[in-house]
Amino acid sequence: MNTFLKQSWAGLRILLALTVLLGVLYPLSVWAVSRLPGLHANAEARDTTLVAVAREGDRYFAPRPSAATLPASGGSNKSEINEDYTKVVDERRTAVAQREGVPEDQVPQDAVTASASGLDPDISPAYAEIQIPRVAKASGLPVEKVRELVAGNTHGTFTTTVNVTALNRAIDSAR
């Protein structure tokens, strides 16, 4: 029993020490550093290319659909055997095909299925390709210029993807 009490007391001391250190002192020090003169003025919100930033209108490329409800992010647990999910995917496929003026069988999977986080900024080159005519027409840019912008924002090592956020910024800059 004596060993049990020694181990319990040691565990309790460690718990209390870590609680004070990580639950009080660390947050307090981070807060104190954030209040140093000159640091606050350098912190500003920026449009990032790591998260899909949806822009409205036909002159922009559409990102993947999102299963997230902002401000949270997250995918859906539904799979292709779920009837509700299948219905949503079919509705999205029809809507994308109509918007882009292509047959439904030419609509890529990433145009109708959400990413795991629901905030993925990347689409497939195939999804970007079917959007080029619409974006060119709506933005007033020549189709070849839009193709160049897509190519300039296409990257990848294992899979080739197009960053929609960066591409839409490039569309704005090219106009």
Image: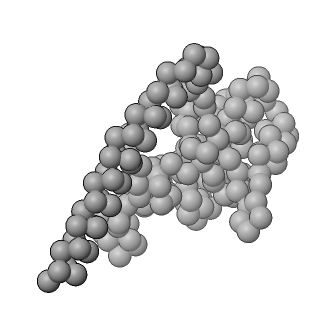
Q: Quadrant of the C terminus?
A: top right
74 relative position to 175: left or right: left
The image position of residue 163, as x and y in percent, is 68, 47
Can residue 154 be seen in the rendering of this structure?
yes
Q: Is residue 159 above or below residue 32?
A: below
Give the quadrant of residue 77. Answer: bottom left
Along the line of sight, the residue nearer the viewer: 107 or 47:
47
32 relative position to 102: left or right: left
Residue displayed at 77% across by 46% down: 153
The image position of residue 134, as x and y in percent, is 66, 39
Q: Quadrant of the N terminus?
A: bottom left
The image position of residue 25, as x and y in percent, is 39, 40
Residue displayed at 73% across by 68% down: 158
Can residue 70 be seen in the rendering of this structure?
no
Give the colour scheme of this rendering: one colour
The image position of residue 173, as x and y in percent, is 76, 25
The residue furthest left is: 1
Q: Is residue 157 above or below residue 171?
A: below
Residue displayed at 66% across by 57% down: 124
Along the line of sight, the residue nearer the viewer: 168 or 95:
168
